[in-house]
Amino acid sequence: MQNYNVYASRLVPKREPFAPGHRACIGCGEALAVRLACKALPQNVIIANATGCMEVVSSQFPMTAWRMPWIHTLFENTAAVASGVESALKAMARKGKRPDTGTKVVAMAGDGGTSDIGIQALSGALERGHDFLYICFDNEAYMNTGIQRSSATPFGASTTTSPAGKMSIGQKTWKKNVPAIAAAHDIPYVATASHSYPFDLMAKVAKGVAMPGPAYIHINSVCPTGWRSAPDLSVRLGRLAVQTGVFPLYEIENGKYKLSMELPELKPVQDYLKLQGRFRHLSEDTIREIQQRVVEEYEKIKEKAQ
Amino acid sequence: MMGERIGIEVSQAIAEAAMLSNVDVVAAYPITPQTHIVEHLAELVANGELDAEYIPVESEHSAMSACLGAVATGARTFTATAGQGLELMHEVLYVASSMRLPVIMSVANRALSGPLNVWGDQSDLMSVRDTGWIQIVAANGQEAVDNIICAFAIGEDRRVLLPVMVHVDGFYLTHVIEPIIMPSQEEVDQFLPPYDYPLPLDTERPVTMGAFAPPVLYPEAKKAQDVNLRGAMPVILEHWDRFEKEFGRKYGPLEHYRSEGAKTLLLTMGSIGDTASAAVDKMRDEGKDVGLVQLRLWRPFPFAEFRNAVRDADLLVVVDRAISFGGPGGPFCSEVRAALYDEEKRPKVTGFIAGLGGRDITVAGFEEMVARGMEIAETGAEQEYEIYGVRE
Ligand SMILES: Cc1ncc(C[n+]2csc(CCOP(=O)(O)OP(=O)(O)O)c2C)c(N)n1
Ligand code: SF4
């Protein structure tokens, strides 16, 4: 991984299906994650995208950053739109109305569009078993509308609808475990990934899209704007999320858990939290509480992976 | 092979019309009184009579969303809903029309909660009148079947590319068995060209669909949409003419019943027209100069034909089956009034709201409304509209 600069050109396709020239903020981890995911996708892919930052930064008419067939319709219905695209491809290939080129379908949405308003459509699509890959780009809040909390916002984070104040530590609930919810649908493939581990991310996306049936990938995506972090720290923050155990990387293949990397020991969450303004107000007690919970959750996954 | 007349439940007939139209994708979510339509489609797919992907979605919001995805990919797509289901789709309906995705849907018209009420009126139809869809209102089962087939031809026409709703009155039509001439497959195949979307989602030719538009472009996009919907009128008429040539049944934006030269005209929309025509017969027998005009095409609204049809009458008695709360009364009546406002020669308009939530409107009811309408025309009334038959 250290030699990324040296080997990248040989390991990563030069193709940029998510073209440069979009309007994401400086240091946007979500845009980086989308870019990496798109590089890992085969060329015969149709993308359905939810409303959110990635739609807004990439698709202002008459411009587009998408070099793949791409459709956006609404915020919460991406899994349903993808269901329709996939069903259409199936029916038309069977009826000889369109050549069967093995086109794959990929749905993309933020954590709000996935864990809150879109979870019904996601659950429906996973339950029905459509052959598609759903990727959640999790920047841990509704960033497009100005940093409001979602159910994927971590405990203690200050957002504009869960502000820290004299009577509040910020977000009062623990992050909803959407990968576990996806896995509970007994789908063939679930994984977590981070843009700060690009090869791991790309391998998982390639695997998920190739897998017949529904696949779900949850990608931790640093948002300097919403996390109140320095733009040049995005990659480092992504790594720290993994190295502290805050965002463990794993796969669930046909129900079997597998950790994606060996972490001899977890770094203290403090290392991760202190670089972000959204946690600036936290007391040592709260940080201790978070530390304890992170270790507990990490151990649970480790146990499942054994 | 010619179609034959059979006794069939209208819901089943609608499902079979979608089958005859060779749909590729059906998205289905049950709601009374639409349920029989999607149930019958499920049976047709299960029995191999219809080769389509049947998506049993988890909500109407997803039903319409799945339809969008399917139509955008180039598949002929059908769904059905009613009342609350149409309300849950509301957000998605605008997307279908603004992205020019010709989804075809039958709506079994139903009252809206609360109080919960599954019976028929046109509150749902009115709540989606501004969503940019073509809206055809069927007065009976035959019209429903024929217009489902026409809807595909109209909506998918490259000069149109708009979604189409075919409205049928919940229960009054959906749950009755009518003698219906079911067209044969050969006839439909001849009438309905295959769906050929100009720019579908295709990896050979990537397109961005559903980009967002900033203020410098949005009004232009909306104007284009309105021009497009209004401009659909001649194409709709063209397909109805073609339909008449092939099938011998004539459709137009309005239906006239003994309206020639009538001084008082009843104006209705949907299945109540049949009862209204019986009332007209009765009143004519009694020497009253009363006729009936039924509106079949709600969007785009047929302004010119409508003005022509009513110009020479003295009084128009409009029967609404929806309320615009705190507004001008019935939405149908207020549109009709607006359409006539600038006319030099125009009838007086009186508005009634009747038949809400499945309350029957009888022949006698129409007679009473006409009589009261005449009274109001002469003496005036406190309110701009009246709700007929409500117990005070
Ligand atoms: C029905 C509906 N409610 C609310 C919105 C407003 N809205 C647009 S994007 C968004 C937040 C998106 O957040 P997320 O899915 O986390 O993606 P991000 O922008 O953070 O990438 C919201 C609330 C909407 N578009 N539609
Ligand atoms: S707000 Fe955050 S997620 Fe959105 S574009 Fe900016 S950095 Fe990226």
Image: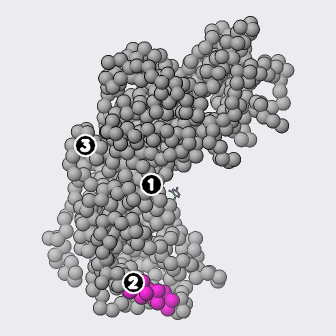
Residue B25 sits in quarter: top left
Are labels 3 and 2 on one chain?
yes
Which residue has dot 2 on it? A300
Is B381 included in the stretch rendered in magenta? no
Residue A77: image tag: 1
Number of marks: 3
Against B368, residue A154 (above or below) is below
Considering the numbered disc 1 on the image, is that residue within a helix, a strand or a loop? Answer: loop
Amino acid type of the residue tagged 3 in the rendering: Arg
Q: Which residue is drawn at 24% across and 43% down?
A: A93
- Sequence-wise, the earlier of marks 2 and 1 is 1
Amino acid type of the residue tagged 2 in the rendering: Lys
Task: Label the magenta part by its dominant secondary structure.
Answer: helix
Which chain is home to disc 3?
A
Residue B50 sits in quarter: top left
Which residue has dot 3 on it? A94
Front residue of this view, candidates A111 and B31: B31
- Sequence-wise, the earlier of marks 3 and 2 is 3
Which chain is home to disc 1?
A
Considering the numbered disc 2 on the image, is that residue within a helix, a strand or a loop? Answer: helix
Residue A214 placement (x, y as % from top left): 32, 60
- Sequence-wise, the earlier of marks 1 and 3 is 1
Give the mark toward the camera: 1 or 3. Answer: 3
- Can residue A233 be seen here? no
Q: Does the residue labelled 3 lie within 8 Å of ligand 1?
A: no
Front residue of this view, candidates B141 and B231: B141
Q: How far apart are marks 2 and 1 (CA)?
A: 32 Å
Amino acid type of the residue tagged 1 in the rendering: Asn
